[in-house]
Image (cartoon, rainbow, N blue to C red):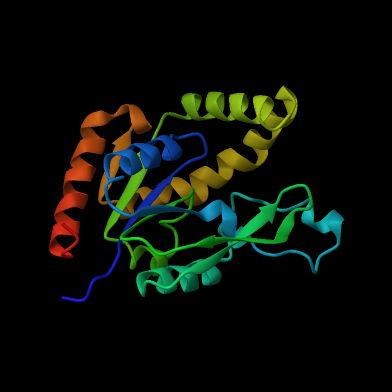
Amino acid sequence: MERKPAVIGVAGGSGSGKTSVTRAIYESLKEHSILVLEQDYYYKDQSHLPFEERLKTNYDHPFAFDNDLLIEHLHKLLRYEPIEKPVYDYSRHTRSNRTIHVEPKDVIILEGILVLEDERLRNLMDIKLYVDTDADLRIIRRLQRDIEERGRTLQSVIEQYITVVRPMHNQFIEPTKRYADVIIPEGGQNRVAIDLVVTKLQSILEQKSFL
């Protein structure tokens, strides 16, 4: 049987705990060769637009992502070819000239708010996860992150949440839950769900002759 990496998609709203789920899976499988590919790195290049136009970017809308490039890179990794992962410059609201070299691995975790929205991406996944967390927890986590790590004001975070994040979540992110194989409530705190997913992944790796 031809060896082919296993792909796990981890979706969910902003502040849902996707990163903690991803980290828990990574730690449980770190005896294997494993990599994390973040959808956030694949925002579209906007260098052709005036800066004033870039400021209007809605980063929670499917159109913000360059899924064509992401899919191209996934296909390369599935063929065990390295990629040059793009880097996004949030200060300039466009793609940086810098890239990150990524070597192929036996397990690929694809993490992002909308990784289950594109059917082409879903078709490349062996397991599709949706991290389902109550809205009050998600907004609290986003407030903490944006104020402490990104220097945002309380008012600006709340305004963005009400005008952009919440409506985009309801329109585009929440509906992708129906595509998930496993829905994980409460993110990385749900050890039972994490253990079940890891057990299934180990079974998939066994079938792919990685064990």
- Is residue 36 rendered to the left or right of residue 163? left
The N terminus, quarter of image: bottom left
Compared to 188, does 170 lie above or below? Answer: below
Q: Quadrant of residue 108?
A: bottom left
Residue 43 appears left or right of 174? right
Look at the picture and state if 4 lies above or below 198.
below
The quadrant of the picture occupied by the C terminus is: bottom left
Tell me the residue at 30%/64% (across/down). 5
Identify the residue at horizontal 36%, vertical 63% (top origin). Answer: 122
- Picture coordinates of residue 61, whole percent (x, y): 59, 54
Q: Position of residue 102 (x, y in %)?
A: 49, 61
104 w.r.t. 18: above or below: below
**In this orientation, which residue lies closer to the viewer: 207 or 18?**
207
Q: Which of the 4 image quarters holds residue 99?
A: bottom right
Residue found at x 42% / y 29%: 134
**Residue closest to the eye, 82 or 191:** 82
Check the image and report above or below for 90 versus 136.
below
Numbered disc total: 0
Give coordinates of residue 64: x percent, y percent.
62, 59
Q: Residue at x 25, y 51 (%)?
A: 181
